[in-house]
Amino acid sequence: MKKNLFKTLLAFAMVIAYGTVSAQENPVDPALISKDQKEIVKLQAKLLEDREKLSELYKSKEKYLSEKDKKQADAQAAADKNEQMAKRLSNDTESKKRARSAKKAANSASSEAKAARKAASRVDKNAKEIERLEKQIEKNEKKLEKLQQKV
């Protein structure tokens, strides 16, 4: 939080310094300059914040991908075990012990598949958020460039 505040204040100070230099060169309405300068500072702060979020998302992307792969492997192993228990039960349909183990294997396979779907969903959400932030950063950079040319 202190980092963001410091960066925002630093950016504001730079804009003020730039504004005083440019204001001396060509006289412009001070109300318009200050409004544009405020907008520039807001955009710079937003860009810094978005870039930090984007870097965090890229870091978490690898973690989510490895988690997804692990969960998919676990789900496949549970499904294979479920299949094996079902075959054993079909060979001895009267056995309560085999029926219980088949039921446990089926429940395990179901929960592992659910965990794998959740992990895949996290990866997809992460990718969408990365894409959204990249577009937002690009849009804000263009907006900032236009405002800086205007000032």
Image (spheres, rainbow, N blue to C red):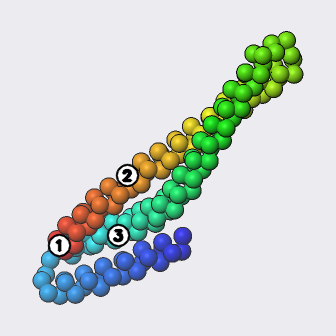
| Residue extending farthest left | 26
Quick check: 77 left or right of 89?
left
Residue drawn at x 50%, y 56% as measured from the top left: 61
As drawn, the label of residue 108 is none
Residue 76 position, x and y percent, is 63, 37
Amino acid of disc 1: Gln
Residue drawn at x 80%, y 13% as measured from the top left: 93
Q: Which residue is mark 3?
A: 44
Residue drawn at x 83%, y 22% as measured from the top left: 98
- Viewer-nearest of labels 2 and 1? 2
Q: Which residue is mark 1?
A: 149
Vertically, is 77 above or below 139? above
Residue nearest the observer in this picture, 105 or 84: 84
Q: How many marks?
A: 3
Q: Which residue is mark 2?
A: 132
Vertically, is 33 above or below 134? below
Residue nearest the observer in this picture, 1 or 31: 1
Report which quarter residue 107 is drawn in. Answer: top right
Q: Is residue 103 visible?
A: no
| Residue extending farthest top | 94
Q: Earlier along the polypeptide chain: callout 2 or callout 1?
A: 2
Report which quarter residue 96 is drawn in. Answer: top right
Report which quarter residue 48 is drawn in. Answer: bottom left
* Alpha carbons under labels 1 and 3: distance apart: 15 Å
Q: Is residue 92 visible?
A: yes
* Alpha carbons under labels 3 and 2: distance apart: 18 Å
- State the SS at label 3: helix
Residue drawn at x 13%, y 81% as measured from the top left: 27
- State the SS at label 1: helix
Residue 94 position, x and y percent, is 85, 12
